[in-house]
Amino acid sequence: MVSQTSWVKKTYKSKGLDPLAVQAISINIYSQLLPGITNVTERARYYSFYPWMVWVYEHLSETKTLSDFVEWVRRADCLFTMIGIRHLEASGDDNFAGHERGLVGSSTLHQAVVGLGQAETLHLSDFTVLDDDKPLRYFKNRLGGLKQYYIGTLDGLGLMTTVGSSVANTNEGGIPLAEAMDAAVDRERFTETVLADEVSVDTLDALRSFCPCQLAGSPLEHTALVDLFFERNRTTTEEGHQRRSTLTLILDLVKAMAAGGNGHQSRFDQSVYRGCVYAGFLPGDQEWKLSPALRATQRQWKTYQKHELLSIAVQSIFWLALDFLAEERPKLYTTEDFIRWFGEQMQVVAAANELDGNYSEALAQTREKLPALSDWLHEEHEITLARKTLDVYRDHKKRAVRGELVRSAGKLLLTIVARDDGSTPAYDPLTFPAEYFALYPINLESLRRLTRDTWPSLSVPHWLAWVAGHWGIEAHLRVALRKLRYQTKDTFHLRPSDHGLEVDAMPDPTYTNPRFSQAVQILEDLGAITHLADGQGLALTPLGEELWENYHA
């Protein structure tokens, strides 16, 4: 008999985000709806500063090596952040969002800059070291925030290209943008500071024109960035059109809420955005009057939010399943064993009594009590139920939440089903490739099939146990095995063992980040929106009004 011995590639433990592969659909959707802005591209001026930084380096006369380029990028990155931190302190206007927010390495550099005395200096190289054991290191990635956060986006927008550690501007995108920025900043002083490796208060003050808040004082650069984000003066691409549509939708929402006087303007945040795009109404059941073009964009975001609601409900029930297993430690070896056991737990049975005896009856009762779609602040509305579900979960370290979380997540899932009339495809008006959902079985289409074919005959405890077992335990093991097979990642939060199903970690139920706060910050950086003088919310600037007027229709 012939035997063969082979090495098995070592796996590595990973936190395992999206343990049910339910958030992947949300991420796919918001990536389509807001391309060119990501969860880590937080400031508009980095889109011009990084091309400018590379452009300046290429014009240096010194001999250049890869290590020289790495050190140049890291020092320039640090100096840009230090300028913003210092300008916040020197201006005294408390506008953190305008100056320091989202600057690379600010958590490390902040204390050094604010503690810098008038006659003292800092060495940039103290912060640009690459050694892991240096506490002052501002960033781990060799090319700092450029490589870690922005280069993929800049590449996608046609501004820069990268191969390994080689970064270059494009002739048609990056170089004109760099030249536009160069017209309004002190290139010589910035370059001298980077090469001399010394920073003082006077130096940072002299370079304040680099602060992100000073973008409006660089007219050519400002115009180029507005053109970039709203795809003005260039052939409109599908991605550019979609980005412009979403940014205009946000401008429209700012405009509508400022005009509405509904008392909710002071909390124009992601939770308000979620409610408005889902319902198509402003807070307080007020109509959101949209042009047909923006109504189509709002409907796309509604589909994103509808899937998010499903995601919160299922994630919460999965967390409950793990919490029960971790606390009770039953010897359960299969999904069927778990479903039988989970449906008999006291909190699950008690929740069933409040939700009526079987799934069909519970769904009928939910439909009868369903608040209007427009009334998304109502305590029984799915938007509010999702918020309450997450609030209950967040209290789990302070009090017992099992029973309340079972009821809240169950009601949320029932309300999502009750709201769906099935008159259009579940993900309308979005489209996905054929067979896309084969990898992501927890979705709005499968929800429809289950509520029609499988769940009606189940009691509420058995229904909740079905969700916890099949859409929780079983789905997670499938996802974790797939990541182990194709990515060599150990992402198991739960694993089968000789002692039954054993819990390794408890994933947090959470929304995805739809890039809303980044989009708002970029609109503020561009000068399209501004905070009102009394601090109560946002308003459009003349530029914002102009952009809205040009594109809302």
Image (cartoon, grey):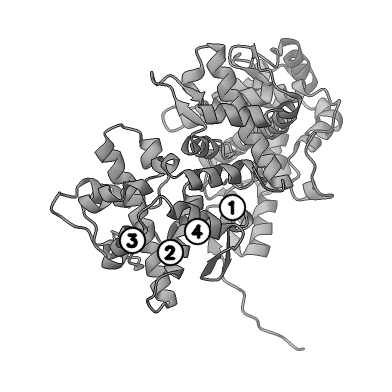
Q: Is residue 33 among what the camera can see? A: no
Identity of the residue drawn at 27% across and 50% down: 206
- Name the secondary structure under disc 4: helix
Q: In the depicted view, which residue is nearer to us: 314 or 514? A: 514
Q: Which mark is residue 553?
A: none
Q: Nearer the viewer, mark 4 or mark 1?
A: 4
Whole-number angstrom distance, CA of label 2 to CA of label 3: 10 Å
Quickly name the residue at label 3: 188
User: Considering only vertical position in the picture, is 17 above or below 537?
Assistant: below
Q: In the depicted view, which residue is nearer to us: 486 or 494? A: 486
Quickly name the residue at label 2: 56
Q: Nearer the viewer, mark 4 or mark 2?
A: 2
Whole-number angstrom distance, CA of label 4 to CA of label 1: 57 Å
Kind of residue at disc 2 = Val
Whole-number angstrom distance, CA of label 2 to CA of label 1: 62 Å
Q: Answer yes or no: do the residues labelled 2 and 1 have beta carbons within 8 Å? A: no
User: Considering only vertical position in the picture, is 288 above or below 208?
Assistant: above
Identity of the residue drawn at 61% across and 65% down: 488
- Mark 2 vs mark 3: which is more N-terminal? 2
Identity of the residue drawn at 28% across and 59% down: 136
- Mark 4 vs mark 2: which is more N-terminal? 4
Quickly name the residue at label 1: 499
Whole-number angstrom distance, CA of label 3 to CA of label 4: 17 Å
Q: Which mark is residue 51?
A: 4
Whole-number angstrom distance, CA of label 4 to CA of label 2: 9 Å
User: Considering only vertical position in the picture, is 166 above or below 105?
Assistant: below
- Mark 3 vs mark 1: which is more N-terminal? 3
Kind of residue at disc 3 = Glu
- Name the secondary structure under disc 3: helix
- Name the secondary structure under disc 2: helix
Identity of the residue drawn at 64% across and 61% down: 484
